[in-house]
Structures are given as structure tokens and as C-alpha cells.
Amino acid sequence: MAKEVTDASIFIMQYPGVYPNETVKAAMDKYYGMLEEIGSTTVSTDDLIAGKVKAPKLIGSVKVTEEMLRFNAYKYAPEYEPMMNADIAKQFGYKDIFAMITFGACDDSNTQPTPPEARDTLLVSQIFHEIENFEPIYPGDTLYMVRDRVDVKDLTPVEGSIYRHLYQKDYGTTYNQDGKIVCKCCFSTMESVKIYKEEFLPKPRKEMGFPDFWEAPDWTNRPALIYTDNDYENLKEIWRNESIRGAEPMYWEDINIGDKANPSAYGPIMESVTPLQPYGQGIAGVRCLKHDILDSEKAAKLIRDEKTGVLMSPIHEENFPETPDGLKGSPQPEGMPGGESVEGNVIDTADIHKAGPNRSALINLITRDIALGHVMNYIGYTGKIRKIKWGIMPSDTHSAMNHPVPYSGDFEVFTRRIRGMENSGITVHGLTTDVAIIKSEVTDKYVVNGRHMVDIVFWAETYNTHEIWITGMVEVELPTK
């Protein structure tokens, strides 16, 4: 990884709105010009569907397949039958099986990273996202993802810093083939970049790859748990008591602030999801084997990994379901930063989460979707999730791990809404071999525009140390009596 050096003798001092040389200035001028073009370009749905809208306004399009929807439901909420069975879905007002609301918006696609020519190292913090859903996503739909605007704040201190801190909020809309808005999204990220003084450049910039420019706290130094039979007995107890409501309605009148779902458990997570633009839920990843472990006949066929103590199926595809539609890799679409031929430090977020001999960081969206499945099971088939927000890597955690960054101004640790958790924080990053313990609590109840709504805060904890690595919330519409 990039050398974590804070010596001002090695890096150029940077100031808000002031650039150290013509190369950086030209790159940033081009970048801001592109953002201006995105924000000033209007789009008609007729032009969008006719293929007349181009990048950078257009992110891309996706033809939704039944196989891909089942692939994601199978991983995250196999108990939620309307996503797996069309007949059951129709009983609850849907036309067919449908996607989780996170399917139609991809943070990697929306986010416009700092140009490679304007940075030698990159530190990312305060990932804070939201998606609001308006229409179900069905097999056969075509989704068109559009950038609405990008807001960037330069939070570099006026007295100067070796870091330029850029906080960006990327807004987008996804439409379907009928021109209806499927969802709106806002993906927010802090990028803190440094530039070497020429005499201290470790290698020519065109030769700098991901390990040379990527900077991050040492998330992976957290010891891995070696799972024992006793751990699996504890997990089985959690699995047997998970809140899975199914077809029984959860009425708005019957739910109260402070109500909690029973905890759920997912894992051990042996592989992260791989980001693939513009798929909002990525590809690959792992399946939780809880149903196999709870079934004594299937459990007898599982094998234990000697290094981790993890029980796995001897059949590879049962642990790591094959992604349908022939999808592999994480290509950067043409017309996006990184899509053109640029030598050197171009971001491919798949690099951040690659499996290897050591533990690797879990991409935020895998735990988000695990938590989403948890909430869907809790509210049952009659509840509808209208919005989801989530965040990882807050500024205070980076500062505690010797990577100080300024507060973005809007990142929220949602567990602080809960009585008794006002001082809680996100202190770690999810890693491979972790078990995610998902917990949730109702924090608000209200009526808006005739809809009867509740807010449910969720979070993921490590199984053994109970440290939080992600928090979020959903706005849920419930039926009334």
C-alpha cells in the first residue's frame, strides 16, 4: 500500500482552490468542466430510451434478468419468498419476482473520482450513501442510469495541508423502459489526495499501480477468529431465532418506537462481493450456509477449513454461487474517468476487495444488502422499503487510526439515534472470515403524504468483539388496519 507518510518535506503543501502546477490545474479544470456539463445537461426519457444520451451524463443501462435477481435473493434473503416465487409475489401486489431496492444504483458508476493526474496517493473516508425507491424492478426491465449532478466541496484547510480533501456528493436517477423513475440516489465520499515533490517520487507516475497510490488505515490487523464447534452452536441459536415474518402483515398500529428485530447472523464471509459497473449489488461473493448447517444431514457433508475453522461445502458453487449472465470483472465504462487510456494510478475498486492469502476488506454494499435482507425478513411481505441510507469509515475512526481527515458535514452514525447508544461509533472495517451480526431497532413512526411509515436503524457487529463496522437506516411503509 502507499507509504503512510505525513512529512511536509516529501509532499507538496496544498491549499483550497490553488493547484501546485499546470498539470494538476489542467486536470482539475477538465474535471470541474465535466461536472458542470453533467449538471447543466437535461435529459428526456424519450432520448434516453432511444440511445441519444451519452456519457458522462449517461452512466449505462442494464437488462434485468430473472437469473440475476434470483442470484442476489439467494445470497441475501432466501427466506423472502416474493423475490423467489412469482406466484407469491403476485399475491402481494407485484407483477413478478423483483429486485432488492439497491439493484438499480451503483456507487462506483455514479462517483466521479479525483483525476489520476491530480493525485499521487488516495485516502478514502466517510462513504455515506442513500437510495430512494419508487418502482419495483422486474425481470425483463431495462434500467437506464443517469447522473443528475455532482457537488464537490474542497475542505482543505486554508492554512494548507499535504492533503487536498475533496468531499463529493454524486446524485443520480435510474429510469426503466417505460420512462418511470425507479430510484434516486446520492453517493457521498471523501477523497484525500497527496502529491509528491518530484525529488521524492518513488517511481515514475506512469508506473504507479494500486499498491503505490492507495492509502488506508490498517484495517486488516484485526485478529481473525478461529471458529470452533461452540461458535457454531452460538450461531445456530441466533439463526433459529431470527425474525422472519413472512406473509403475516406487520401493521403500522402494532409497531412502536424501540421495537427490535431479533439479531441475525451472516457468515463467515469468505469472499467479498466484487463491484461491477453499473450493477448496484455487484457480482460474485459468498452464500451464508446457515440452512445447510441447521440441517443435520447437510451439515454432516460440510468440511472444516483447517486455517479458519470455517465450515464449507465441498461443492465450490454452493459456497460461492456463480454469477449469471456471464458477468466477470470490473470494467470502467467508456467515457468515465479511468475509461480512457490513462497510464498509472487509475482506480479499480475491485483491487480494494480482492481475496488473497490474508484477510481483505469487505465492500460496503455486501453488508448493506445483508442488513437489507434482515429488515425485509423482519417487516414481512406486506412492508415496503422506500429508502435506505448507510455509511462506513467515519472521520473520527480515521483520526483514531492516525489518518486524520475533516468531517464531511453530513455523515451520520445512525446508531446514535438509539437510546443507550448515543456514544456508539463505527470502529472497524468488515473483513473476510467475519460473521456479521445484524441488529436493528425502530426509531421513528409517522405519517407522510398518506403513507404510514417507520424508520428502522440497522447495524453490523463483529461476532466475537461486538465492534460496529456499518450503520444505516431504512424508511419503511407499512399497511394499516
Image: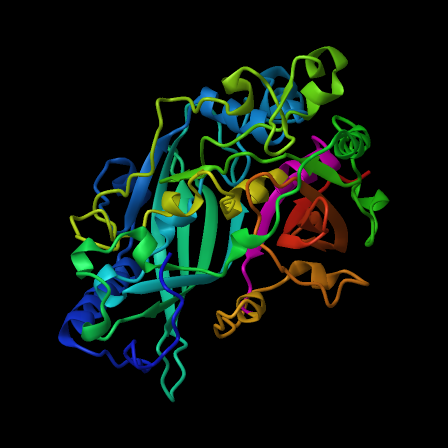
Residue 51 at x, y = what percent?
23, 37
- Residue found farthest to the front: 306
* Residue drawn at (54%, 71%) of the image: 399
- Residue found farthest to the top: 297
* Residue drawn at (71%, 44%) of the image: 463
Was residue 89 drawn as part of the magenta stretch in this picture? no
Which quarter of the image is occupied by the N terminus?
Answer: bottom left
Q: Quadrant of residue 98?
A: top right
- As displayed, is residue 197 above or below residue 120? below
- As displayed, is residue 328 above or below residue 254? above
Q: Nearer the viewer, residue 321 or 172?
A: 321
User: On the picture, is 443 further left or further right than 201?
Assistant: right
User: On the picture, is 475 further left or further right than 16?
Assistant: right
Residue 451 at x, y = what percent?
68, 47
Q: How is the image coloured?
A: rainbow
User: On the picture, is 288 further left or further right than 10?
Assistant: right
Residue 38 at x, y = what percent?
28, 58
User: On the picture, is 26 further left or further right than 10?
Assistant: left
- The span picked out in magenta is 371-395
Residue 449 at x, y = what percent?
65, 52
- As displayed, is residue 443 above or below residue 183? below
State the count of labels. 0
* Residue drawn at (35%, 29%) of the image: 328
Which quarter of the image is occupied by the C terminus?
Answer: top right
Q: Nearer the viewer, residue 186 or 16?
A: 16
